Image (spheres, rainbow, N blue to C red):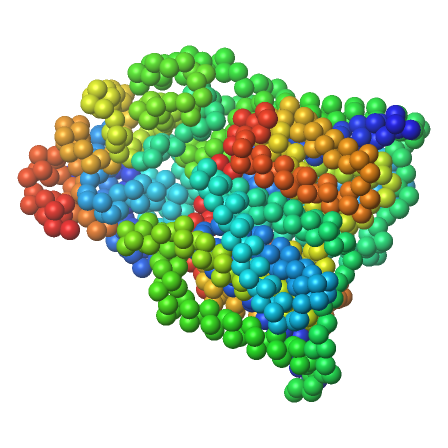
Amino acid sequence: MGVAAQLIINGVIAGSIYALIASGFSLIYSVAKFMHFAHGVVVTVSAFMLFLFVGILGIPFWPAALLTVVFAALFGLAMNVFCYEPLRSKKATNAVLLIASLALTILFQSLMIAVFGADIKTVRQGYVGTGMDFLGGIITELQVIIFVVSIVILVLLWLFMKKTRIGKAMRAVADNEEVAQTVGINPRKIYNITFIIGSAIAGIAAILIALEQNIEPNMGFSLMIKGFTGSIIGGVTSVPGSVLGSYFLGLVENIGIWYLPSGYKDAIAFFLLFIFLLFRPQGILGINKGVQK
Amino acid sequence: MFEAYLIHLAILICIYAVLAISLDLAMGYTGLMNMGHVAFFGIGAYTSALLNMAGVPFIVSMLAGALLAGIFGFILSWPTSRLRGDYLALATLGFSFIIESFMKNWTSLTRGPLGIPGIPRPNIFGLVISSQLSYMIFSLIVMVVCFFIITRIEKSPFGRLLEAVRDDEVAAKTLGENVRHIKSMGLLVSAFFAGIAGSLYAHYISFIDPTTFSILEVILLFSIIIVGGLGSSKGALIGTIIILLIPEPLRFIGFPSSIVGPARQIIYALLLLLIIYFKPKGLFGRVKLGEN
Amino acid sequence: MEKDIAPILELQDVSKNFGGIKALDKCSFYIKKGMITGLIGPNGAGKTTAFNIITGLLKVDEGKVLFLGKDISRMPTYLVARIGLARTFQQVRLFDNLSIEENLLVAINHPGEKFHKCFFYTRKSNSFKKKIEEALAFVGLNKSMTTIASELSYGQKRLVELARALMMDYSLLLLDEPTAGVNPAVREKLKSLLRKLKKQGKTILLIEHDMDFVMSLSDEVIVLSSGTKLMADKPEKVMKDKRVLEAYLGK
């Protein structure tokens, strides 16, 4: 029973991280209608920035964390303004934007290696703590924080989307951009706001991951794949769906390696991704908007 | 010394040119956004290496590797047949991750992350292609043959069907064309030749491991065909030459070696972004990227 | 319409839903061989959906599509085309990067198009050149065969698409709004073209919003409204029918 509990705990924690990333990605996809794969490298670079602030510049943790989130938001915004918008104005297709996002990923990932070196960095704040017993499994303080923070952020996001004027405008653009324009919503502005919010969430995810795990140049990419898989499973056009899908993935992954050699953990995600893309690309909760011809 | 370096570059150019023109067949001619091409490269490499080292004659090993890659290409085409551009791209990428995962984890077959060292040079009917120079001539011959075959396919009536499927598959269907089958054949041939390139690579570098066939190679390949231009064999060749040669001066500028690797990737990524924006048809392309 | 001759095409109680919207609702109609039939109705009546169902691009949720008595409801599009249904589209669908000549060649069942024959043929069209020239002359297109399709004007593209459909071995031609966006001269040309095709024994079903065009050309007119058949009769009778007027205005 202890093992099962541990696997579930691990799955839920992993799912929380994936959910944070997936929610930002899915938010951007549902509004801007393309796959911003570089969302992952926003996480990577933000994590390195945290390392820079805390580890190199010696800034105390909380101000550094705030700076990191602001950085993340601006970084994501910059990608939209300087890369995606110009391409969109040239009528680039979704496929082209995807390639551009991959190029951005490799660009900044390599930049991190060049500037910081390829070795692993850590940002320890004494949060590691001893594990607590929880229903037969062990969970650390930090992990509890991760879980709580992600739930809080996701709930806040949900409230934002439902109750605020901007949130409603974003949903309007996601639903039907042309109609949204006729009621005076400026899609460009909404795209920018979406990138800011989505990337800020990515920044928060980066901080949590940096505390719990290690900072390495391709962390964002692997997480993006997981987050993307979570989105696809739940429905990439649906933020709640992406969140659910991410938790599902976290659980399946961790329970899966009970049966498979642990090296295949990532393969579980790829396999799920592949299967869903093939047979149910709209995910469990999403809408089939032109995914298939 | 410098001569050896040039020969090395020439061999790599031949190998990547075959990869490029085979990817162009899938993307430029059939319109399939295939981000998983590197998986076929890897399948060809591993198969050829493992068979040859188990005693199978080189030519058979190479062809077996290519055939296996082709079969995977064919299999991949079925379920992905109905996916739209960006979803197809991600499905093929997912496929390449799955293959990479097997390379890393099926250790009894592939030795996992340790890779396969000591891959022998080709032995063709007793003639061993051991020297650099002879390998260069060998790869040049293979490249020319591959280019010839692929361009013949592209210039045949079947090639016309590939292009029709790329331009408007709905219209093609209503004209009686079995689009599924056409896409499958396009992907099969594309994967086959990627497998040939894989074999060339494995028996040259003599060591392969799963990292050789990673996402970074995908960006490299995309840079090549987008810079060279889609739908053009000339573009594939010249794109290869440009992309492989551009980062070379980095070696001589005196950057520490830890920077050279990432700097190269940065150059590829920037080039890719610039070309997509300023010249989406690339240098010799006939088709714009991602027409849909 | 009297049903004494077996219909060439028949829809039987065809229904098609799109996420809650009933595009076609137990729709039934039939077309007789050798006639020009018009398919009219207000926007959203289900006309293009019917075309997509007939040609296999969409699958029926309920009901059947019969062609020459054979059930083709489950048939994939490319096979539907091969048994003799040709169509054009509302938004012209050409192979933009191919020449006019190559666009038309795709329609022909060229023996060299099989993959394993790749090395025995080139893309030159010598054996079919004459047929292509005739098709282009028939539609009255005055452009060189080697022009790339993307360089053509909208009206020229429509003519090429029509010529391409005519290259097929077809017995039923489905035209989706052939006069949309074309100038009056081209419209008249199209009228005489369709009459010529009828004389050749071809059957034509056309969706149109241009009432003059449809009424002057059609032997029969079918009216769709809200996914079902409202009526099917001779043009003069349809034009006078109050229900048809209501359908167009009363929405």
Judge whether residue B211 can be spotted in this image. Answer: yes
Residue B247 image point, x, y percent = 74, 35
Of residues B60 and A198, the one drawn nearer to the viewer in this rendering: A198
Q: Is B280 left, or right, of B206 in this rendering?
A: left
In the rendered structure, the answer to whether residue C43 lies left or right of residue A255 reads left
- Can residue B70 be seen in this snapshot? no
Which of the 4 image quarters holds residue A146?
Answer: bottom right
Position in image of residue B32 (x %, y %): 56, 39
| Residue drawn where x is 88% and y is 27% of the image | B2
From the viewer's side, name the closer residue of A208 and C4: A208
Counting from the top left corner in percent of width and height, residue A240 is at 47, 67
User: Is A130 placed above or below B241 here?
Assistant: below
Residue A171 point in image, percent of width and height: 38, 60
Residue at 88% over, 25% down: B3
For residue B10, above or below residue B188: above
* Residue occupying the point 12% across, 35% down: C234
Observer-nearest residue: A169 or A94?
Answer: A169
Q: Quarter of the image for the N terminus of chain C: give it.
A: top left
**Relative to A108, residue A160 above or below:** below
Image quarter of residue A150: bottom right
How many labels, in total? 0
Residue at x 49%, y 56% (from the top left corner): A195
Closest to the observer: A81 or C235? A81
Report whether C103 appears left or right of C193: right
